[in-house]
Amino acid sequence: MLFKVEMTVNIPKDLPTAEADAIKLKEKNYSQELQEAGIWVHLWRVVGQYSNVSIFDVRDNAHLHEVLTGLPLYPFMKMNVVALCQHPSSIK
Amino acid sequence: MLFKVEMTVNIPKDLPTAEADAIKLKEKNYSQELQEAGIWVHLWRVVGQYSNVSIFDVRDNAHLHEVLTGLPLYPFMKMNVVALCQHPSSIK
Amino acid sequence: MLFKVEMTVNIPKDLPTAEADAIKLKEKNYSQELQEAGIWVHLWRVVGQYSNVSIFDVRDNAHLHEVLTGLPLYPFMKMNVVALCQHPSSIK
Amino acid sequence: MLFKVEMTVNIPKDLPTAEADAIKLKEKNYSQELQEAGIWVHLWRVVGQYSNVSIFDVRDNAHLHEVLTGLPLYPFMKMNVVALCQHPSSIK
Amino acid sequence: MLFKVEMTVNIPKDLPTAEADAIKLKEKNYSQELQEAGIWVHLWRVVGQYSNVSIFDVRDNAHLHEVLTGLPLYPFMKMNVVALCQHPSSIK
Amino acid sequence: MLFKVEMTVNIPKDLPTAEADAIKLKEKNYSQELQEAGIWVHLWRVVGQYSNVSIFDVRDNAHLHEVLTGLPLYPFMKMNVVALCQHPSSIK
Amino acid sequence: MLFKVEMTVNIPKDLPTAEADAIKLKEKNYSQELQEAGIWVHLWRVVGQYSNVSIFDVRDNAHLHEVLTGLPLYPFMKMNVVALCQHPSSIK
Amino acid sequence: MLFKVEMTVNIPKDLPTAEADAIKLKEKNYSQELQEAGIWVHLWRVVGQYSNVSIFDVRDNAHLHEVLTGLPLYPFMKMNVVALCQHPSSIK
Amino acid sequence: MLFKVEMTVNIPKDLPTAEADAIKLKEKNYSQELQEAGIWVHLWRVVGQYSNVSIFDVRDNAHLHEVLTGLPLYPFMKMNVVALCQHPSSIK
Amino acid sequence: MLFKVEMTVNIPKDLPTAEADAIKLKEKNYSQELQEAGIWVHLWRVVGQYSNVSIFDVRDNAHLHEVLTGLPLYPFMKMNVVALCQHPSSIK
């Protein structure tokens, strides 16, 4: 079941760089595990923004919530979640 | 080069059904040709809306404009275009 | 799987009354079948508005899309869809 | 008398964790007492957000205000309150 | 129980004047009956707008909905409803 | 001459409680003097918000500005000011 | 007593030109009478828009409402009204 | 050449009062020099707000930018700039 | 003196094609004369939209208003006008 | 390939002036190198704002992202990116 999620990151300027870097590294690992598991199926950077456009393939709403709130950067993110489904003209 | 495009269709209620159906059929064919050509790389329906979320892979901005304005439903659509690029955490 | 859906109805003033009434009757029947089937689990009127707040319990996103676009009043509605899940403080 | 209330929590990052945890625990207890009393009749988490969608059944406006401003997390919440009533198509 | 209701009227320009005048007269009578009954407790015109700011004193949400949707101009109005209660500094 | 004023209070969390309480007490006294003088003619709490809906009866614009900027909580308030006048359907 | 009023005109495209011209001429005369009377004290065109920025000097709110709703183009205008007063740094 | 400029001042609460007062005094002097020079031709206070509505008469865009960014309170202001010109109905 | 102007065209669907084409041709000619005269210094299409981003170099505000309202498509356009000036980092 | 980028700078008031000045100097140099390289093809100041309107000519989306995120002031900027293409009426 697919969802489009758009995330915008806003790390407070007073967070120590070392701490911020540690969180970003965890975020990268977490993200790549989910990608390899086929859950975070697409991940693109928005040009000029500290934002991404993502597509998640999850079992259900609860699964998506668990995945999103588990993001190490979650406390510094704004999220926008949109439920998707098959488009009648899609050839996939 | 990737772009996210979100399209919302609003066909006027006074357009004759036959005419609307003809346009929708052309739209479907046009869309599927672009999908098969690897230009319209993703196409999802937004749940509960006459809207889609699409990803286009085009040569450049002009190519995207040509593809979008060529849509048979273009005169009845609102479009939102966002430039994308590689995300540093993406495994693709 | 639960979704909150808010629907606002806007029937064009030039739709003949008989036609509007027929659609509203179909809407009522459709809505009550879905309620009896346990799919449309809550339906409230917003005070002062031709709008409702609804909770749907569906199998997945595609199921919700099918249910919503099947509404007889769908062509005259604006929809807002929000995915819900279990709240950790809920006793249900 | 029913109201939909949507609450978004934003706990300041400089609130000590122990203090935040104590408030959240009080919030949970307060919420569950109101649920058991049949006042806070529904409580759902919004997917991907630190937000909820709630339905309250209260005696009157003053009662709702008392209940909401009594929330331990109230100082950190944004609230949106919408008055509801019986929908003519509801089977309940 | 008090509510602030703000109403903006937008009568379509193609509604025949006689019909519009008949509706406005009904509206005036309806409004004055509710004022005399102590239900529509305040009614002010917004300067420069075809809008009003109103205070209603109703038994409950359902009563307010019945009163508002009974307005002869209701099909041509946008409404904004806000629940009010006693202010701790009010001397009334 | 009547104005609707909506005020939303946002006291910074780092203001010492004693200081905040002193300001709130002054605010209450100031408000009640204006109510007794027939200047602040209505004052309601918005349900679930630290906001009010107020009606002021002032000599002129300058008088309203003097009254509003004299509020002890003024530095912590957002204000929305709307000029009102007699409604043709009002029975008052 | 001063108010800033911003008006945006939107004449429906199906209004016959002769009728539109007659209304615009009345509007001009009405506007100039009010300017000569010292009531419509400033009137500027917004560059690129069918909009104006105006300053009115009126006896009270009711006077402003009477003046604005008397505009021949009033049925085709959106209005934004802001109450002004003496600025402490103004030398006038 | 005329421009409408609307300025809203937001002085941070942690700016020492003496410093704030010194800036405000400079602002007043600067403003009055520009008024006397016929550059800042109108200056009104918005009722209930720490905002003004101003009309500037400048040589060109660059002149306006120089004047506005020279305001002692500029770092604490939000600005909205609108280009104006002669209105065909204006008698001035 | 430079201005950025963004124009969005919305030609009503009931305008006869021949009439629309005639207006568009006039628009093109008008636009190219202004470009050749060094007044309309840049003109770009926004990808996916019937909109443009333009830079005008005009004598003053009145000149810009005359140029914009002279556009054959002006009655079908929304305009957004922003005054520009030399940027201190620009090498031009 | 052209993009319009609008940047608004908001340097935190607690950033030491020397540090801010150093960043601004780097920004100026970086900007001028890109201008000389024909990548940052236009750069204008918005009158009255700490904002600019810029036109970039880049190889592709990734190139634009690299250029924008490399701005020394990037952490203090809000960006708005719009893809442009040839306008059919442009004479260039």
Image: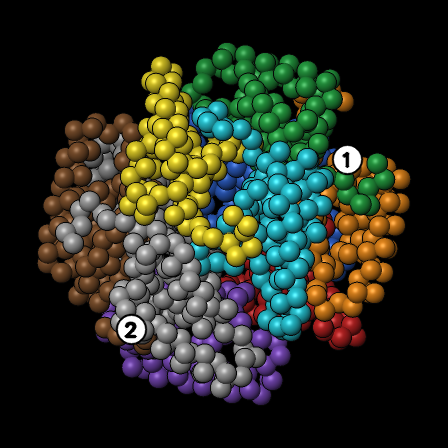
Chain colours: A purple, C brown, E yellow, F cyan, G green, H orange, I blue, J red
- The residue tagged 1 is H1
User: From this viewpoint, is residue F24 visible?
Assistant: yes
Please report, as a chain letter, where disc 2 is located.
C
* Left-right relation of H45 to C76: right
CA distance separating discs 1 and 2? 63 Å
Say if H46 sits above or below A18 in the image.
above
Q: Is mark 2 on a helix, strand or loop?
A: loop
Identity of the residue drawn at 23% across and 45% down = C74
Query: Where's residue C13, x and y in %?
Result: 29, 29
Q: What element carries label 1?
A: loop
* Left-right relation of F28 to E28: right
Identity of the residue drawn at 45% across and 86% down = A26
* Left-right relation of H17 to E40: right
> E78 and C92: which one is in front?
C92
> C72 and H44: which one is in front?
H44
Identity of the residue drawn at 78% across and 68% down = H16
User: From this viewpoint, is residue I41 visible?
Assistant: no
Query: What count of labels does the image hold?
Result: 2
Please report, as a chain letter, where disc 1 is located.
H
Quarter containing the N terminus of chain C: bottom left
Badge 1 amino acid: Met
Q: In which quarter of the image is residue A12?
A: bottom right
Quarter containing the C terminus of chain C: bottom left
Q: Which mark is residue E67?
A: none
> F51 and G25: which one is in front?
F51
Query: Where's residue E19, x and y in %?
Result: 33, 18
Front of the two marks 1 and 2: 2
- The residue tagged 2 is C90
Query: Where's residue F92, x and y in %?
Result: 49, 29
Badge 2 amino acid: Ser
Say if A63 sits above or below C84 in the image.
below
**Crowding at label 1, few (<14), some or many (≥20) Cα neighbours within 10 Å?**
some
